[in-house]
Image (cartoon, helix red, strand yellow):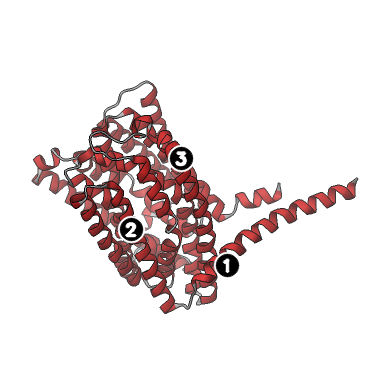
Amino acid sequence: MKMLKKIAREDNFLSLTGNLVIAILGIGGFALLARTLSIQVFGEWVLFVAAGSFVEMFRFGITNTGLIRYLSGADTVSRVKLIGSNALISLGATIFVAVILIACKMLFPDAIRNSGYNIFFTWYPLLAFLNLPWNIALVVLQADRKYAQILALKSINSGFFFLVILINFIMLDLTLTQLVIALLIINAITSLMSFVLGWDGILLIRKASSETNKTLLHFGKYTTFTLIGTNLLRSVDTLIISLSPLGSAAVALYSIPLKLTELQQIPLRSFAATAFPKMSKASVQNKIEEVKDLFYSYSGALTYLFIGISIFTFVFAEFFVLLISGSQYLVTDPITGFNVVDIVRVFSIYGLLLPIDRMTGIALDSINKPKINALKVFVMVIANVIGDLVAIFIFKSLILVAIASILFTILGIWMGMYFFNKEVLISYKEIFKSGLKFYLSLFNKITHKRYERFVKFENNI
């Protein structure tokens, strides 16, 4: 029992639990909407979410990574200034984004109204302000490694919206606009909670200094691009498909395997969220060997885990498609000629490559090399865009779009390892050795505890 309590309080477990809960609610809501909305309207919802996620990489990417890194070793005075600067810069970025979107809506009303992005340009400017406080709170809590509070915020936000979707599925027939309005209300409630509890640090804006502003912006000019690029690697496929003759129906079909990749990325996001603060702290304290050990341990453990996840996803691809979207997506689509199950299997192979690619990026940021990480992501985005354009406009194939994801990720792994190795000598072999050591150590801890309890029981007899 003590061991279970200890595990339940451990950072990695709390982070994994949080992402697991959010992923289950997100995928559950996605599945219900896929069954509730027509393919065309569902495609518009996918575009709203994808475009919103992309813009939020800009809004929060400017400061998030830098704040986590610098708060890791900050004193009390610096901490207050950094949190204030984070809130100030995030507010400024939100105002900038809102003005741009409103201007576009006013200047090109017909083009936007006739595209799949009408809902996004109409409602996202308001959503940006309503979700600002609780998103700021998330990064402060992550820097402080308060994963229980992060879990609470995310559960409230995702849980309430899932409840709305579930009620709509059972008894209501809400339009897409009404669903978005519900999303706005829920984000306002979540932000109010984070403000009342003082987690967001918005009131510390007046404590921001020009020095901390410059510190975060200098680091952020690279990490912003990295985060936007990372998001583009996930969303550029959807963007290019939406602008192609394949249309919104193909967007809806491709969104299903993309959503399933989120299942693969649950442990990746969870462990990455705990790895970065630890590696940053070790780097700030000039403990290079500790940075290397953390990189090896996380990369190796996640790689072995993803081998199992990818095999499971590949074998049970049909079941996952049925679970997420219903039987109508199991067969080859008669209009587009695409098969969702085949695309899912390609993405399961893509999942094998994610851990080392993600960890090299985290490692470069943690040792204060965000410029190099930004370059790595830039090259990956260019490779992905070229691959998508060839796949869609020349071969008209969604399978080849998925294969392009595998190719650009291999390129990213090579670049990440090459640049990280130039700063800190590392080896591929040690990644896999450390991964084995991690699981052997975990196995020994579990079996040793069981053996101790067994011996104690025998002695009592």
Please tell me the numbered disc located at residue 433. Answer: 1
Element class at badge 1? helix
Above or below residue 435? Residue 264 is above
- The residue sitting at 42% across, 65% down in the picture is 362
Above or below residue 210? Residue 28 is above
Residue at mark 2 to residue at mark 1: CA–CA distance: 28 Å
Q: Position of residue 13 (x, y in %)?
A: 56, 51
Q: Residues within 10 Å of mark 1 (few under 14, many from 20)?
A: some
Nearer-the-camera pick, 348 or 111 = 348
Disc nearest the viewer among 2 and 1:
1
Quadrant in the rendering for residue 206: bottom left
Element class at badge 3? helix
The reply to whether discs 2 and 3 touch (Cβ–Cβ < 8 Å) is: no
Tell me which amino acid carries mark 1.
Answer: Lys
Pointer 2 residue? 230
Q: Which of pointers 2 and 3 lies earlier in the amino acid sequence?
A: 3
Q: Is residue 395 left or right of residue 165?
A: left
- The residue sitting at 49% across, 54% down in the picture is 306
Nearer-the-camera pick, 301 or 229 = 301
Residue at mark 2 to residue at mark 3: CA–CA distance: 22 Å
Above or below residue 223? Residue 241 is above
